[in-house]
Image: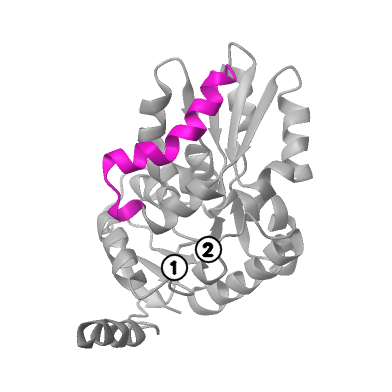
Amino acid sequence: MRRKKTRLLQHEMHSTIFSDKAMNADFAFLDSGTGGIPYLSHLKKKVPYASCVYLADTKNFPYGEKSPEEISECAAKSVSIIIEKWHPKAVVIACNTISVTALDMLRKRFTPVQFIGTVPAIKPAAKISKTGIIGLLATRATINHPYTKNLISEFAKKCRIVSRADPELIAFIEKKYIYASAAEKFAALEPAVTFFKDSGCDVIVLACTHFLNIVNEIQTAAGSGIKVIDSREGVAKRALEITGFSKNPCTLPEAGDYLYVTGFNDERGFEEYEKLCSKAKIEFCGKI
Protein backbone atom coordinates (compact mmCIF):
# COMPACT_ATOMS: atom_id res chain seq x y z
CA MET A 1 0.00 0.00 0.00
CA ARG A 2 2.80 2.40 0.92
CA ARG A 3 4.58 1.71 -2.36
CA LYS A 4 1.46 2.40 -4.41
CA LYS A 5 0.79 5.57 -2.41
CA THR A 6 4.35 6.77 -3.03
CA ARG A 7 3.96 6.26 -6.79
CA LEU A 8 0.68 8.17 -6.79
CA LEU A 9 2.30 11.05 -4.90
CA GLN A 10 5.15 11.10 -7.39
CA HIS A 11 2.61 11.17 -10.21
CA GLU A 12 0.85 14.13 -8.62
CA MET A 13 4.13 16.03 -8.30
CA HIS A 14 4.75 15.54 -12.02
CA SER A 15 1.24 16.64 -13.00
CA THR A 16 2.30 20.25 -13.50
CA ILE A 17 4.99 21.82 -15.62
CA PHE A 18 8.33 21.20 -13.99
CA SER A 19 10.51 22.34 -16.89
CA ASP A 20 9.40 25.19 -19.11
CA LYS A 21 12.47 25.52 -21.27
CA ALA A 22 10.88 25.94 -24.70
CA MET A 23 10.01 29.62 -24.34
CA ASN A 24 10.42 30.36 -28.05
CA ALA A 25 10.35 27.54 -30.58
CA ASP A 26 11.06 27.45 -34.29
CA PHE A 27 8.49 24.70 -34.82
CA ALA A 28 5.61 23.43 -32.71
CA PHE A 29 3.96 20.05 -33.24
CA LEU A 30 0.43 19.10 -32.19
CA ASP A 31 -1.18 15.67 -31.98
CA SER A 32 -3.77 14.00 -29.77
CA GLY A 33 -0.96 11.84 -28.41
CA THR A 34 2.62 10.94 -29.19
CA GLY A 35 1.96 9.60 -32.69
CA GLY A 36 3.40 12.68 -34.37
CA ILE A 37 6.89 12.30 -32.89
CA PRO A 38 8.23 10.68 -36.11
CA TYR A 39 7.36 13.92 -37.93
CA LEU A 40 9.42 15.94 -35.47
CA SER A 41 12.31 13.48 -35.75
CA HIS A 42 12.22 13.60 -39.55
CA LEU A 43 12.34 17.39 -39.57
CA LYS A 44 15.23 17.45 -37.11
CA LYS A 45 17.32 15.25 -39.38
CA LYS A 46 17.18 18.09 -41.90
CA VAL A 47 17.59 21.02 -39.47
CA PRO A 48 19.11 19.82 -36.17
CA TYR A 49 19.64 23.44 -35.11
CA ALA A 50 15.88 24.17 -35.16
CA SER A 51 14.19 24.21 -31.76
CA CYS A 52 10.98 22.20 -31.51
CA VAL A 53 8.22 21.85 -28.95
CA TYR A 54 5.58 19.12 -29.05
CA LEU A 55 2.16 19.26 -27.38
CA ALA A 56 0.33 15.96 -26.99
CA ASP A 57 -3.33 16.58 -26.13
CA THR A 58 -3.48 13.31 -24.22
CA LYS A 59 -6.31 14.56 -22.03
CA ASN A 60 -8.60 14.39 -25.08
CA PHE A 61 -7.09 11.29 -26.72
CA PRO A 62 -8.30 9.84 -29.06
CA TYR A 63 -9.45 12.46 -31.56
CA GLY A 64 -10.37 9.89 -34.21
CA GLU A 65 -13.61 8.87 -32.50
CA LYS A 66 -14.80 12.43 -31.83
CA SER A 67 -17.26 14.56 -33.82
CA PRO A 68 -15.89 17.27 -36.16
CA GLU A 69 -17.06 19.91 -33.67
CA GLU A 70 -15.25 18.25 -30.78
CA ILE A 71 -12.07 17.83 -32.82
CA SER A 72 -12.11 21.51 -33.83
CA GLU A 73 -12.71 22.67 -30.26
CA CYS A 74 -9.91 20.54 -28.80
CA ALA A 75 -7.46 21.54 -31.53
CA ALA A 76 -8.21 25.26 -31.13
CA LYS A 77 -7.59 25.09 -27.37
CA SER A 78 -4.28 23.33 -27.89
CA VAL A 79 -3.13 25.78 -30.57
CA SER A 80 -3.98 28.67 -28.25
CA ILE A 81 -1.65 27.18 -25.63
CA ILE A 82 1.10 26.66 -28.20
CA ILE A 83 0.99 30.22 -29.51
CA GLU A 84 0.70 31.84 -26.08
CA LYS A 85 3.60 29.93 -24.55
CA TRP A 86 6.05 29.21 -27.34
CA HIS A 87 5.46 31.67 -30.24
CA PRO A 88 6.57 29.24 -32.99
CA LYS A 89 7.47 30.25 -36.52
CA ALA A 90 5.18 27.45 -37.73
CA VAL A 91 2.82 24.86 -36.27
CA VAL A 92 2.88 21.34 -37.70
CA ILE A 93 -0.45 19.61 -37.19
CA ALA A 94 1.04 16.14 -36.76
CA CYS A 95 -2.37 14.48 -36.87
CA ASN A 96 -4.31 13.52 -39.98
CA THR A 97 -7.64 13.75 -38.14
CA ILE A 98 -7.07 17.36 -37.04
CA SER A 99 -5.66 18.26 -40.45
CA VAL A 100 -8.60 17.06 -42.53
CA THR A 101 -11.15 18.33 -40.01
CA ALA A 102 -9.90 21.61 -38.58
CA LEU A 103 -6.89 22.92 -40.52
CA ASP A 104 -8.85 25.53 -42.48
CA MET A 105 -10.48 26.77 -39.28
CA LEU A 106 -7.15 27.00 -37.46
CA ARG A 107 -5.59 29.01 -40.29
CA LYS A 108 -8.46 31.49 -40.25
CA ARG A 109 -8.68 31.80 -36.46
CA PHE A 110 -4.97 32.12 -35.81
CA THR A 111 -3.84 34.33 -38.70
CA PRO A 112 -0.97 35.03 -39.42
CA VAL A 113 0.44 31.82 -37.86
CA GLN A 114 1.81 29.39 -40.44
CA PHE A 115 0.29 25.89 -40.31
CA ILE A 116 1.44 22.70 -42.02
CA GLY A 117 -1.02 19.83 -42.12
CA THR A 118 -0.55 16.09 -42.45
CA VAL A 119 -3.04 14.59 -44.88
CA PRO A 120 -3.36 11.07 -46.33
CA ALA A 121 -0.72 10.40 -49.00
CA ILE A 122 -3.33 9.40 -51.59
CA LYS A 123 -1.66 11.19 -54.51
CA PRO A 124 1.76 9.46 -54.25
CA ALA A 125 0.05 6.14 -53.53
CA ALA A 126 -1.94 6.36 -56.77
CA LYS A 127 1.25 7.11 -58.70
CA ILE A 128 3.13 4.04 -57.49
CA SER A 129 0.32 1.48 -57.27
CA LYS A 130 0.47 -1.16 -60.02
CA THR A 131 -2.69 -3.01 -59.14
CA GLY A 132 -4.76 0.11 -58.52
CA ILE A 133 -5.79 -1.22 -55.09
CA ILE A 134 -4.68 1.06 -52.26
CA GLY A 135 -5.07 0.45 -48.55
CA LEU A 136 -5.91 3.39 -46.30
CA LEU A 137 -5.16 2.85 -42.61
CA ALA A 138 -6.57 5.75 -40.60
CA THR A 139 -9.00 6.91 -37.94
CA ARG A 140 -12.73 6.72 -38.54
CA ALA A 141 -12.91 10.52 -38.63
CA THR A 142 -10.23 10.77 -41.34
CA ILE A 143 -11.76 8.05 -43.49
CA ASN A 144 -15.26 9.55 -43.36
CA HIS A 145 -14.29 13.18 -43.81
CA PRO A 146 -15.16 14.88 -47.14
CA TYR A 147 -11.57 16.14 -47.42
CA THR A 148 -10.30 12.56 -47.72
CA LYS A 149 -13.04 11.67 -50.17
CA ASN A 150 -12.07 14.68 -52.28
CA LEU A 151 -8.42 13.59 -52.27
CA ILE A 152 -9.46 10.19 -53.57
CA SER A 153 -11.76 11.71 -56.19
CA GLU A 154 -9.06 14.09 -57.42
CA PHE A 155 -5.95 11.92 -57.35
CA ALA A 156 -7.10 8.28 -57.33
CA LYS A 157 -10.16 8.10 -59.56
CA LYS A 158 -9.01 4.93 -61.25
CA CYS A 159 -7.98 3.21 -58.03
CA ARG A 160 -9.97 1.21 -55.52
CA ILE A 161 -9.41 2.47 -51.99
CA VAL A 162 -9.71 -0.14 -49.26
CA SER A 163 -10.16 1.69 -45.95
CA ARG A 164 -9.67 0.44 -42.42
CA ALA A 165 -10.29 2.40 -39.22
CA ASP A 166 -8.28 0.86 -36.40
CA PRO A 167 -8.82 2.61 -33.04
CA GLU A 168 -7.57 -0.47 -31.18
CA LEU A 169 -4.17 -0.33 -32.91
CA ILE A 170 -3.93 3.42 -32.30
CA ALA A 171 -4.68 2.93 -28.59
CA PHE A 172 -2.08 0.13 -28.42
CA ILE A 173 0.60 2.42 -29.90
CA GLU A 174 -0.25 5.30 -27.57
CA LYS A 175 -0.59 3.32 -24.35
CA LYS A 176 1.35 0.05 -24.69
CA TYR A 177 3.89 0.36 -27.51
CA ILE A 178 6.79 1.58 -25.42
CA TYR A 179 6.72 -1.53 -23.19
CA ALA A 180 5.57 -4.03 -25.82
CA SER A 181 7.75 -6.86 -27.06
CA ALA A 182 8.34 -7.42 -30.78
CA ALA A 183 5.86 -10.31 -30.69
CA GLU A 184 3.20 -8.11 -29.07
CA LYS A 185 3.71 -5.37 -31.67
CA PHE A 186 3.32 -7.79 -34.56
CA ALA A 187 0.27 -9.37 -32.94
CA ALA A 188 -1.34 -5.92 -32.63
CA LEU A 189 -0.76 -4.94 -36.27
CA GLU A 190 -1.41 -8.37 -37.83
CA PRO A 191 -5.20 -7.95 -38.29
CA ALA A 192 -4.73 -4.72 -40.27
CA VAL A 193 -1.95 -6.06 -42.48
CA THR A 194 -3.86 -9.29 -43.17
CA PHE A 195 -6.93 -7.24 -44.10
CA PHE A 196 -4.99 -5.30 -46.73
CA LYS A 197 -3.21 -8.38 -48.04
CA ASP A 198 -6.49 -10.23 -48.47
CA SER A 199 -7.89 -7.19 -50.31
CA GLY A 200 -5.08 -7.30 -52.89
CA CYS A 201 -3.48 -3.96 -51.97
CA ASP A 202 0.02 -3.22 -53.23
CA VAL A 203 0.26 0.11 -51.34
CA ILE A 204 -0.77 0.94 -47.78
CA VAL A 205 -1.14 4.60 -46.82
CA LEU A 206 -0.52 5.29 -43.14
CA ALA A 207 -3.01 8.10 -42.56
CA CYS A 208 -2.74 8.37 -38.80
CA THR A 209 0.58 9.59 -37.42
CA HIS A 210 0.53 6.98 -34.64
CA PHE A 211 1.15 4.24 -37.19
CA LEU A 212 4.53 5.74 -38.07
CA ASN A 213 5.86 4.51 -34.74
CA ILE A 214 5.55 0.97 -36.09
CA VAL A 215 6.10 1.66 -39.79
CA ASN A 216 9.06 -0.74 -39.98
CA GLU A 217 7.05 -3.52 -38.36
CA ILE A 218 4.11 -2.88 -40.69
CA GLN A 219 6.41 -2.99 -43.73
CA THR A 220 8.03 -6.21 -42.52
CA ALA A 221 4.65 -7.86 -41.95
CA ALA A 222 3.32 -6.63 -45.30
CA GLY A 223 6.27 -8.04 -47.23
CA SER A 224 8.13 -6.82 -50.29
CA GLY A 225 5.03 -6.93 -52.50
CA ILE A 226 3.36 -4.08 -50.64
CA LYS A 227 4.75 -0.56 -50.28
CA VAL A 228 3.95 1.27 -47.03
CA ILE A 229 4.00 5.07 -47.38
CA ASP A 230 3.38 8.20 -45.31
CA SER A 231 3.69 11.99 -45.58
CA ARG A 232 6.76 12.75 -43.44
CA GLU A 233 9.00 13.92 -46.26
CA GLY A 234 6.39 16.18 -47.82
CA VAL A 235 5.50 17.74 -44.47
CA ALA A 236 9.14 18.42 -43.56
CA LYS A 237 9.86 20.01 -46.94
CA ARG A 238 6.81 22.23 -46.66
CA ALA A 239 7.70 23.29 -43.10
CA LEU A 240 11.21 24.31 -44.17
CA GLU A 241 9.90 26.05 -47.26
CA ILE A 242 7.37 28.33 -45.57
CA THR A 243 9.69 29.26 -42.70
CA GLY A 244 12.72 29.94 -44.87
CA PHE A 245 14.94 27.45 -43.07
CA SER A 246 17.94 26.31 -45.06
CA LYS A 247 18.58 22.61 -45.54
CA ASN A 248 22.28 23.31 -46.06
CA PRO A 249 24.83 22.50 -43.35
CA CYS A 250 24.80 25.05 -40.55
CA THR A 251 27.38 25.93 -37.92
CA LEU A 252 24.75 26.55 -35.24
CA PRO A 253 24.69 24.00 -32.40
CA GLU A 254 21.96 21.38 -32.20
CA ALA A 255 18.86 22.76 -30.48
CA GLY A 256 16.84 21.00 -27.82
CA ASP A 257 13.34 19.58 -28.25
CA TYR A 258 10.62 19.44 -25.60
CA LEU A 259 7.39 17.52 -25.16
CA TYR A 260 4.40 18.37 -22.98
CA VAL A 261 1.16 16.48 -22.38
CA THR A 262 -2.25 17.68 -21.25
CA GLY A 263 -2.96 14.63 -19.07
CA PHE A 264 -1.87 11.14 -18.02
CA ASN A 265 -3.64 7.83 -18.64
CA ASP A 266 -2.88 6.44 -15.17
CA GLU A 267 -0.20 6.60 -12.48
CA ARG A 268 2.29 5.03 -14.89
CA GLY A 269 1.72 7.72 -17.47
CA PHE A 270 4.65 9.89 -16.46
CA GLU A 271 7.09 6.99 -16.64
CA GLU A 272 5.78 5.93 -20.03
CA TYR A 273 6.14 9.36 -21.60
CA GLU A 274 9.54 9.91 -20.03
CA LYS A 275 10.80 6.62 -21.47
CA LEU A 276 9.30 7.34 -24.90
CA CYS A 277 10.86 10.81 -25.01
CA SER A 278 14.23 9.49 -23.91
CA LYS A 279 14.16 7.03 -26.79
CA ALA A 280 13.28 9.84 -29.23
CA LYS A 281 15.92 12.17 -27.71
CA ILE A 282 13.29 14.67 -26.63
CA GLU A 283 13.13 16.18 -23.13
CA PHE A 284 9.85 15.38 -21.40
CA CYS A 285 8.57 18.45 -19.54
CA GLY A 286 5.45 17.05 -17.90
CA LYS A 287 1.81 18.07 -17.87
CA ILE A 288 0.82 21.53 -18.96
Residue annotated with mark 2: 89
**Label 2 near label 1: C-beta < 8 Å?**
yes
**49 relative to 43 in the view: left or right:** left
Helix, strand, or loop for circle 2? loop
Residue 205 x, y percent position in the rendering: 55, 32
Residue drawn at x 63%, y 66% is: 75
Residue annotated with mark 1: 25
Which part of the image, by quadrant, shows the N terminus? bottom left
**Mark 1: few/some/many CA within 10 Å (<14, 14-19, 20+):** many
**49 relative to 33 in the view: left or right:** left
Residue drawn at x 70%, y 19% is: 159
Q: Let me know if residue 212 is in the magenta part.
A: no
Residue 229 can be seen in this image = no
Residue 114 x, y percent position in the rendering: 61, 59
Residue 154 x, y percent position in the rendering: 77, 29
What is the CA distance from the residue labelled 1 to the residue labelled 2? 7 Å
For the image shown, how many numbered marks are present on the structure? 2
**104 relative to 40 in the view: left or right:** right
Magenta stretch bounds:
177-203
* Residue type of the residue flagged with mark 2: Lys
Q: Let me know if residue 185 is in the magenta part.
A: yes
Circle on res. 152: none
* Residue type of the residue flagged with mark 1: Ala
Direction left: furthest residue: 3
Residue 44 can be seen in this image = yes
